[in-house]
Image (tube, grey):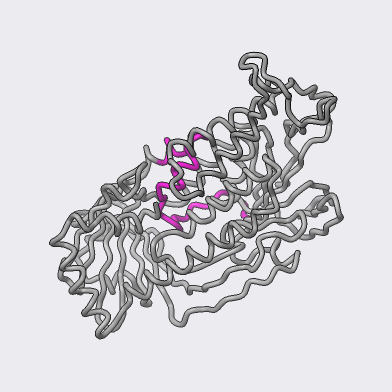
Amino acid sequence: MTAQGTTLVSKAKMDPAPTGRRYPKHNQATGFRTEPLTLVLMLVEHRAAPGAGIGLARWAEAQRDAILQQIWMGTCPPGFDNPDRANHSRRMKILIVGAGPTGLTAAVELARRGIVPEIIDRKEEASTLSRAVGVLPRSLRTLTPSGVAERLLAEGVKMRNVHLYFDEKHTLELSLRNGHPDRDFGLALAQDRTEAALRDAFIRLGGRVGYGTELVGIRQEHDKVLATATGGAERTYDFVIGADGIRSVVREAVGIAFPGRDLPGNWSIADVDAENWRHPADFTACNLEGGRVAVVAPLAATRFRVISNTDDALKTLPLELNVKNVRRQGQFNISIRLVRTYRSGRVFLAGDAAHCHSPAGGRGMNLGIADAAELADRLVTDRLDGYSASRHADGKATIAASEQARRLITSTGFMRRLLSTGAGLLNRLPPLHRPFARDFLQS
């Protein structure tokens, strides 16, 4: 099946007024000179400033999105000249390669602002694998305007506590309450369900996913990208987004290096149905002698993900888990990699195509969602120059945090004893839970 083009809504570019101003110079209602979109964008940028109020930042983002949506649809808010869409015949064409959470987030965020991209994936059909399971508050905030967050919240398991065991000893129950201003929990949900919610939202917004379609060639000219997919002719796009995973064809095609290292040893995973698990709605981590670790996260009421840095996650878990059915079991290796640039001309990278790290902390999918949302926003608002630097900084920080968590949970010897003592002390001092909860929820 080959992806077909979708009619796009024009991205309006404001024609200069006779005075040369980009925006109307006078607001009849207030009597003041105003540039509404400029002011709103300034407020959005202000969110990164020290002391910026979270409510102000969200208001600014909502105002910006509403203004842009009205511009695209030709019904401008007060303070704007109504652009004649007949004078804006050029339509932005964007190709997204990869229909995982990152690619689908980019597609949804563009489509809800009036730019419906094409999206292709070499898989013959949508994935049914659980893969990533954690959806953090920042991602839920990102996915709220599209309605995706509401569906995820309805389907997912709200994890409000983290349990830490040393061998079979329950040492710490860490409350996540007050760890984030939006949510007092981390959401656990199988990745295929997250993808389904995103895909359905994209379809509602007028898009479609071209499964069974693989990118086989890409080349750039100064004002366009020419891409060829299996079974099709070369097509022209304004921009291409590579969200096609660790073995990204897009990244290879444009020659972006992917430096890093592979960690020694195998990790294992098991997706199981089980009854009477002691922490059915919480995250559980077990530190064992020799640096071994086993982690259990809920996927549904009686479905769980078990991960270990050994060859067999289920055998390594020191706690009783009454497994009724094994849906999937296997091994994997971990690579720590980060591109030096997320951009080559008109081609951009996002998600695992740009970074990969250990599953410690459950931040990989969330980082990809953040990449996609920021890129979509910058495409709409024509602020592409800062994308690579911004995302590289976030990727570097996330990898550092993930590696710190991995080293901590797999610690041995003196560090393991120190961690056990500290966890026991923290368990007796609930008021100190908040900063740790904030780190876990990445607020």
Residue 190 at what x, y percent from top left?
Answer: 42, 51
Note whether 140 is above or below 227 in the view shown: above
Q: Would residue 436 appear left or right of 402 to someone viewing this image? A: left
Residue 113 at what x, y percent from top left?
Answer: 63, 34
Residue 15 at what x, y percent from top left?
Answer: 81, 29
Q: Nearer the viewer, residue 190 or 176?
A: 176
Note whether 293 is above or below 382 in the view shown: below
Count of numbered circles in the view: 0
Q: Residue furthest top?
A: 29
Residue 295 occupies which quadrant of the picture? bottom left
Note whether 392 is above or below 346 in the view shown: below
Whether residue 32 appears in this view of the structure is: yes
Q: Residue sitting at 73 percent across and 24 percent down?
A: 25
134 in the magenta segment: yes
Residue 78 occupies which quadrant of the picture? top right
Q: Nearer the viewer, residue 116 or 443?
A: 443
Residue 24 at what x, y percent from top left?
Answer: 73, 24
Note whether 417 is above or below 284 in the view shown: below
Magenta span: 123-152
135 in the magenta segment: yes
Q: Nearer the viewer, residue 48 or 279?
A: 48
Q: Residue sitting at 68 percent across and 72 percent down?
A: 257
Q: Would residue 330 appear left or right of 422 to someone viewing this image? A: right
Q: Residue sitting at 74 percent across and 41 percent down?
A: 4
Q: Residue sitting at 40 percent across and 47 percent down?
A: 137
Q: Residue furthest front?
A: 32
Q: Would residue 428 appear left or right of 51 to someone viewing this image? A: left
